[in-house]
Image: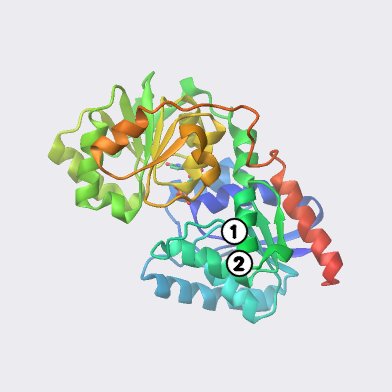
Amino acid sequence: MRVLTVVGARPQFIKAAVVSRVLRQKHTEILVHTGQHFDYNMSEQFFEELNLKKPDYNLGISGGSHAQMTGKMMIAIEDVLIKEKPDWLLIYGDTNSTLAAALAAAKLHIPICHVEAGTRTHCMTNPEEINRICADHLSNLLLVCTASGMEELSREGLEERSVLVGDPMYDAFLTYRHAVPVGKLELSLLKGRKVKLPAEYYYLTCHREENTNDNGLEELFKTMEQLDAAVIYPVHPRNKERSIRMSDKLQTKNIILSEPVGYLESICLVNHAKKIITDSGGLQREAFFAEKKCVTILDFIVWPETMTDSRNQLSSIKSHDILEKLNTPQTINSGYAPFGDGNAAEKIVDCMVRKTKEDIIL
Ligand code: UDP
């Protein structure tokens, strides 16, 4: 098979790395990076750490409104698809890069395989929800992480094209969870210095606009100042300036503002944290894999499987709500493994091969 993969954002590099390794054993992959994430520590570092091959094409497209970014990506991806004539377009998750690639390929009648299909928040003001729904309905093969994803697709009449394969993020977690020893980890502070990891800490990732506007960030930082251990907060580049300003205004003492860390470091931080506070879909699952208590600052559920037995709880940005949820104990049922068996990558490639044969695409 000749597979053209389109990625653009941090979580997609992680998923693509585990799938690409299996795919390239027997097939040809052409890797396209849209450029949506472009800072070294949001992009290149992931390619280096995870041995992901350098992209064959880097489209250099980022920023602007959703329509501007998606439109520019569609135009550029269409050119690449026409030139490369792949048997499949392979896409991941829910970003503008995912949507742009799906739209371009569908109009060229190129079969589309969507990994992480079926994830739904049922919140249409969440831009990723629009991307997910469109990508799923345009795809020929929908590869799903969890049973609830299969149910969502069945409700939308897509079950015949859907297969439950498990979560490639779980494959990545199992592969890399011991890659960085905790004693080796140093954090690069936003203000330049490097510091060692404290013995006890909470791990915070928060980058959604609704949580990191001035009001949200002030409430969040005041709450983090009340916790009984330091809070490690690797800051997304778009929140850097705001986070420094808020930390200076509040004279924070407990929050360690750092540059974004690499994936291997992030997994190490997850594994050794007291608890996790996040608004990221990836972090919620990683907290679950590592059996860490997680509080998710969102007003919609993305990964219902993580929400059993108080393991992961939704919270508003309000201080009392976050603190109450952080103090609610979790129950661990160690037989509960809703994200597959750690072999999602093999199953993804297998499904593509089987579907190719069934449809006599080649
Ligand atoms: N992550 C990372 N460095 C950081 C923060 C997060 O490598 O400084 C990883 C994290 O472990 C997870 C992924 O990035 O695997 C989540 O990405 P992000 O929060 O950007 O996207 P989302 O999960 O919200 O789609």
- Work out how far the residue at label 1 is from the one at label 2, CA to CA, in angstroms: 7 Å
Quarter assignment of residue 107: bottom right
Q: Residue at x 55, y 42 (%)?
A: 305
Queried on whether the Cβ of the residue with tag 1 lies below 8 angstroms from ligand 1, the answer reads: no
Residue 309 is situated, as x and y percent measured from the top left of the image, at 50, 33
Q: Residue at x 36, y 41 (%)?
A: 259
Q: Residue furthest bottom?
A: 107
Q: Residue at x 45, y 30 (%)?
A: 293
Residue tagged 2: 156
Neighbour tally class for label 1: few under 14, some 14-19, many 20 plus, Cα within 10 Å: some
Task: Please say if the residues under marks 1 and 2 sit with CB atoms less than 8 Å apart.
Answer: yes
Badge 2 element: loop
231 w.r.t. 160: above or below: above
Marker disc for residue 345: none
Quarter of the image containing the N terminus? bottom right
178 or 209: nearer the eye? 209
Residue 331 is situated, as x and y percent measured from the top left of the image, at 51, 26
Marker disc for residue 152: 1
Q: Residue at x 46, y 67 (%)?
A: 61
Q: Is residue 3 visible?
A: no
Residue 69 is situated, as x and y percent measured from the top left of the image, at 43, 71
Residue 220 is situated, as x and y percent measured from the top left of the image, at 25, 40
